[in-house]
Amino acid sequence: MSNERIAQGAVAARGGVRDGGARRPAEPLWARVRRHWLGPTQPWWGAVFVAPILLLLVCFKFWPMAYAASLSLTNASLTQRTSRFLGAANYLRLTHDTVFIGALETTARYVSATIAISMVLGLALAVLLNQRLPARGLFRTLLFLPAVVPIIVTPILWQFLFHPYGLVNTVLKSVGLHPVNWLLSARGAVEALVVATAWRLTPLCMVIYLAGLQSIPHELYEAAAIDGAGPPRRFRSVTLPMLKPTFLVVVVFAITLTVQNFVLALVMTGGGPDNASTTLSLFVYQTGFIGFQMGYASAAALVMLLIIVAFTIFSLRAFRTHEE
């Protein structure tokens, strides 16, 4: 056996990898981390420039999350100076809490309905505003206005609209329908929250869709038109596949904003009537800052975080493109 074959065998025994038919030694761990995270052309002192944002993330993101995780294992309260370790007792208590289970069901209905309405309306408006229309810039500005209304103004505005003598019931009566006491009925309260949240979320989805539509090469539409594809076929075969990465951004963005949003429920309904419109975020707020049970509220907050992460991972897999 030649010396070259002996050397190749030794490299293979140490975990070497094949590169163009020849084997080379395995790359050290630190070299792989440096190549992936800093890049071959990045100087080491480039980390100095990202250090401030990393420090902010640690102080205001990761440290509060770690502290909440530690609180969720105790009976910490705002009214007591000491706390006792409980293990997983808070999480087991959540499985028997009817208010928490009701909040889970309400959040599922609220989030799914809001995201469905916002995604469909946002896409329709984006496709419409992507056409060559007169005064297109003015329409874009007017349709985006709900997104820039202060978050505390939105629920107050919709409280007036959903009042028993408000504009919504006036419209219903004008078409021969019975008025509804929206904010004081179990079903109407959640529907009112869905409409108010979708009104604010749709313009944000529209802008993201519009950016995705304008990034599609026009040559694809021209090639499809030459092949005889009409507007519906071009939308189905060109627009929707090319918008797949945009759908992922919109879904993750909408899930994160909708699950965490509690200002609308707090101001419009306060979780009532009889906890019918209590969402997960409102349950965490009421348990921690009104019931003073910080340990129990932290456990519910971590469950909410896990739900958001699970839906995000599911969305990443559902909208994964072949290029990835």
Image (cartoon, helix red, strand yellow):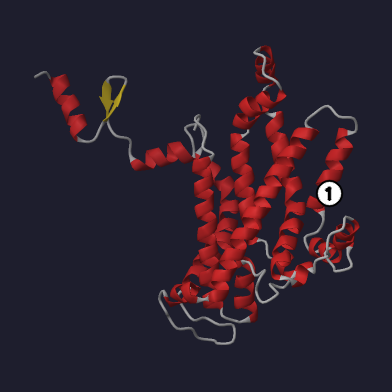
Locate residue 221: give its quadrant: top right
Looking at the image, residue 153 sits to the left or right of residue 85; the answer is right
Locate residue 240: give its quadrant: top right
Image x and y of residue 304, in percent: 55, 63
Q: Residue 268 or 236: which is nearer the viewer?
A: 236
Outermost residue toward the front in this view: 176
Give the residue pinned by disc 1: 145
* Residue at image location 59% in from the left, 68% down from the top: 103
Q: Is residue 157 above or below residue 41?
A: below
Locate residue 228: give its quadrant: top right
Looking at the image, residue 4 sits to the left or right of residue 185; the answer is left
Looking at the image, residue 215 sits to the left or right of residue 81; the answer is right
Looking at the image, residue 152 sits to the left or right of residue 70; the answer is right
Q: Is residue 216 visible?
A: no
Image x and y of residue 97, in percent: 52, 76
Outermost residue toward the left in this view: 1
